[in-house]
Image: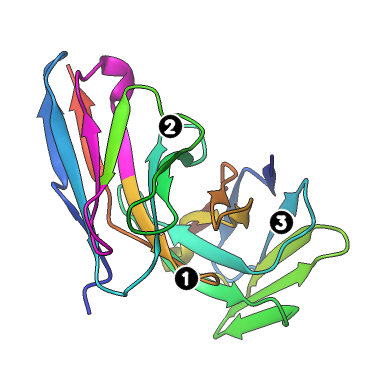
Amino acid sequence: NAGVTQTPKFQVLKTGQSMTLQCAQDMNHNSMYWYRQDPGMGLRLIYYSASEGTTDKGEVPNGYNVSRLNKREFSLRLESAAPSQTSVYFCASNTHTEAFFGQGTRLTVV
Amino acid sequence: KQEVTQIPAALSVPEGENLVLNCSFTDSAIYNLQWFRQDPGKGLTSLLLIQSSQREQTSGRLNASLDKSSGRSTLYIAASQPGDSATYLCPSEEGNNRLAFGKGNQVVVIP
């Protein structure tokens, strides 16, 4: 039982490049989330998906897109990376009671 | 919008002292509450889950309580150890199973 798996763990992008962060969970959860964590700030919600086929904006969605490919997978795409998107990204899934987090993706945009 | 305040923001204590970490919420309509720890450069590890019918939860040296009427939770760590050094987080629900995070309690336990 792997829980929530994120790939890659580290990535360096040049400004304007695009990339997709992958997330998969094997716990059959309906809800999945993408957060970003910046120094001195709490985790902030980018997008979430309450169920397969649905996605909604969170607190800081600008510059990102998401895809809920199936119940297991929820990907986050940066179409044109900017230095302001340098951050640590966390994927999560939950039941109605308990949340589970991936180990994070450390992204640097230069 | 749910806002989470964690006090103290940072503290350093000598090994062996007890730790008391506080969390407060602007919306006290809380059903479940999880406390997490985060080590530097790592992900979030769940410590304790207080479910909707519970007021507290214990695991080893850790005890977490939740007072829904006041919108406050406390994490108590007995006899602290250097391995307890981490940032502690107590996110709260804000609808659609989303979690709102505070900035955390950053703890350093000095050997």
> B90 or B17: which is nearer to us?
B90
How far across and how far down the image is residue B5, in percent? 69, 44
Q: Secondary structure at mark 1?
A: loop
> B54 or A30: which is nearer to us?
A30
Tag 3 subunit: B
What is the crowding at mark 1: few (fewer than 14 residues within 10 Å), some, or many (at least 20)?
Answer: some
Nearer the observer: mark 1 or 3; the answer is 1
In the picture, the quarter occupied by the N terminus of chain A is: bottom left
Q: Which mark is residue A39?
A: 2
Q: Which mark is residue B95?
A: none
- Residue located farthest toward the front when viewing the structure as drawn: A53
Q: Secondary structure at mark 2?
A: loop
| Residue found 41% across the figure and 67% down from its top | B83
| Residue found 30% across the figure and 24% down from its top | A85
Spatial separation of the CA atoms under disc 1 and disc 2: 28 Å
Upstream in the sequence, badge 1 or badge 2? 2
The answer to whether marks 1 and 3 mark residues whose Cβ atoms lie closer than 8 Å is no
The magenta stretch spans which residues? Answer: A68-89
Tag 2 subunit: A
A79 in the magenta segment: yes
How far across and how far down the image is residue B103, in percent? 57, 41
| Image position of B59 (left or right of A105) | right
For disc 3, the marked residue is B22
Q: Secondary structure at mark 3?
A: strand
What is the crowding at mark 3: few (fewer than 14 residues within 10 Å), some, or many (at least 20)?
Answer: many
Marks 1 and 3 share the same chain: no
Q: Which mark is residue A95?
A: 1
| Residue found 47% across the figure and 65% down from its top | B84
